[in-house]
């Protein structure tokens, strides 16, 4: 008997039995507990997803699966049901991300670091805005996702950690404090960050950007959050813009060398490296709004220096990174010095 071979028809029969027996009797009959992770939504009713998947197995394979034979999460029962076209929702809201907390902190700061109530128009507006944020997948959003009560509660979590607060703090999280401290240290800059996130959400700009791969995000540090970082990297990866920047440099008689360390891909890799170099968007995230990217906003840079710039905030400019490299060379660190390019007569880094 093949475990997992359930069909849409089998699921519908399980839903009918659930409706006939009621939740308590259905769960008791098959030994399941109420869902704590994911719910199945069907015809405006919610069902315990793991139990439904396990019982659907009976109609397709002759026996119901025991609770210990499958997992109710996204990797198992919920995924089976989603693949069959059913709508799956999380039974609890996902954790708040830095982007969301930035907007909540901005609201708290505007209110003098005092808590806001759920019926405050500003809380209601932020609730609606957060629900448009393309960070959490649909299956993690339940009917209470970022509702006004939840948003008001988050402002409480934030404001009760403010240095001027004298009462007992709530059980918030470390990220609340981290983002609040960013606002306290750099209020004008973080207010700009919040404004750019808001503008991008209202314009629907972030929905058009491809989600980042989590592994890549690990090496990119940006206190401004993921959404502005996605937009920043989208601009850097714009092939047409990168080509224009390279063409402009060549027309000016400039070699394609890294503006931070002098590395020349063609000098090191020959024909394979000819015409290649990366672009870095030098405008800080808190300054980069929706406007068009100009060629002067971009710097030509090698892959290594590009990673080093993005690795830890605050990001150094190519010129600042160049100073670090040059300082290391001057102290005798083993860093290859630029090598003269015979074709251009301009220095370029040797191999690293």
Image: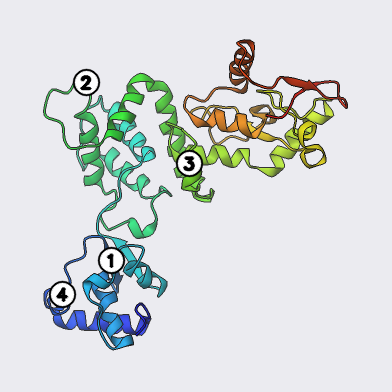
| Earlier-in-chain disc, 3 versus 4 | 4
Asked if the residue at tag 4 contacts the one at tag 1, i.e. Cβ–Cβ closer than 8 Å, the answer is: no
Q: Quadrant of the N terminus?
A: bottom left
Q: Callout 3: few (<14), some (14-19), or many (20+) C-alpha neighbours within 10 Å?
A: some
| Earlier-in-chain disc, 2 versus 4 | 4
Q: What residue is pinned by disc 3?
A: 217
Colour treatment of the image: rainbow
User: Tag 1's secondary structure?
Assistant: loop
Q: Residue at x 45, y 44 (%)?
A: 202
- Give the alpha-carbon distance from disc 3 to disc 4, as whole Å: 42 Å
Q: What residue is pinned by disc 2?
A: 163
Q: Is residue 47 visible?
A: no
User: Tag 2's secondary structure?
Assistant: loop
Q: What residue is pinned by disc 4?
A: 31
From the image, state whether disc 2 or disc 4 is nearer to you.
4
| Earlier-in-chain disc, 3 versus 2 | 2
Q: Residue at x 19, y 38 (%)?
A: 117
- Give the alpha-carbon distance from disc 1 to disc 2, as whole Å: 42 Å
| Earlier-in-chain disc, 1 versus 4 | 4
| Above-or-below relation of 110 to 8 | above
Q: Callout 1: few (<14), some (14-19), or many (20+) C-alpha neighbours within 10 Å?
A: many
Q: Tell whether 326 sits left or right of 11.
A: right
Q: Which mark identifies residue 72?
A: 1
Asked if the residue at tag 2 contacts the one at tag 1, i.e. Cβ–Cβ closer than 8 Å, the answer is: no
Q: Is residue 67 visible?
A: yes
Q: Quadrant of residue 54?
A: bottom left
From the image, state whether disc 1 or disc 2 is nearer to you.
1
- Give the alpha-carbon distance from disc 3 to disc 2, as whole Å: 31 Å
């Amino acid at each position: 008997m093949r475990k997992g071979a359930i069909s849409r028809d089998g699921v519908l029969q399980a839903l009918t039995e659930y409706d006939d027996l009621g939740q308590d009797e259905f769960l008791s009959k098959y030994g399941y507990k109420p869902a704590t992770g994911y719910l199945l939504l069907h015809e405006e009713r919610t069902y315990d997803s793991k139990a439904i998947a396990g019982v659907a197995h009976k109609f397709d394979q002759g026996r119901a699966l025991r609770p210990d034979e499958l997992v109710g999460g996204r990797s198992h029962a919920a995924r089976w049901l989603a693949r069959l076209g059913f709508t799956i929702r999380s039974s609890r809201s996902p954790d708040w991300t830095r982007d969301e907390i930035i907007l909540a902190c901005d609201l708290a700061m505007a209110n003098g670091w005092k808590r806001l109530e759920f019926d405050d128009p500003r809380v209601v507006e932020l609730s609606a805005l957060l629900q448009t944020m393309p960070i959490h997948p649909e299956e993690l959003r339940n009917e209470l996702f970022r509702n006004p009560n939840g948003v008001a509660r988050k402002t409480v979590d934030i404001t009760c950690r403010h240095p001027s607060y004298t009462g007992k703090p709530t059980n918030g999280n470390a990220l609340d404090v981290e983002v609040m401290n960013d606002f306290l240290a750099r209020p004008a800059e973080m207010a700009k960050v919040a404004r750019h996130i808001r503008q991008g959400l209202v314009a629907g700009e972030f929905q058009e950007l491809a989600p980042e791969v989590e592994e890549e995000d690990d090496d990119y540090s940006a206190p401004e959050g993921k959404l502005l970082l996605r937009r920043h990297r989208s601009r850097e990866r714009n092939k047409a813009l990168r080509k224009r920047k390279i063409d402009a440099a060549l027309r000016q008689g400039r070699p394609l060398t890294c503006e931070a360390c002098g590395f020349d891909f063609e000098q090191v890799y020959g024909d394979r490296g000819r015409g290649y170099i990366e672009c870095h968007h030098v405008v800080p995230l808190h300054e980069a709004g929706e406007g068009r990217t100009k060629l002067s906003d971009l710097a030509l840079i090698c892959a290594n220096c590009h990673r080093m710039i993005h690795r830890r905030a605050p990001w150094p400019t190519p010129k600042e990174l160049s100073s670090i490299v040059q300082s290391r060379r001057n102290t005798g660190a083993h860093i290859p010095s630029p090598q003269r390019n015979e074709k251009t007569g301009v220095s370029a880094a040797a191999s690293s």
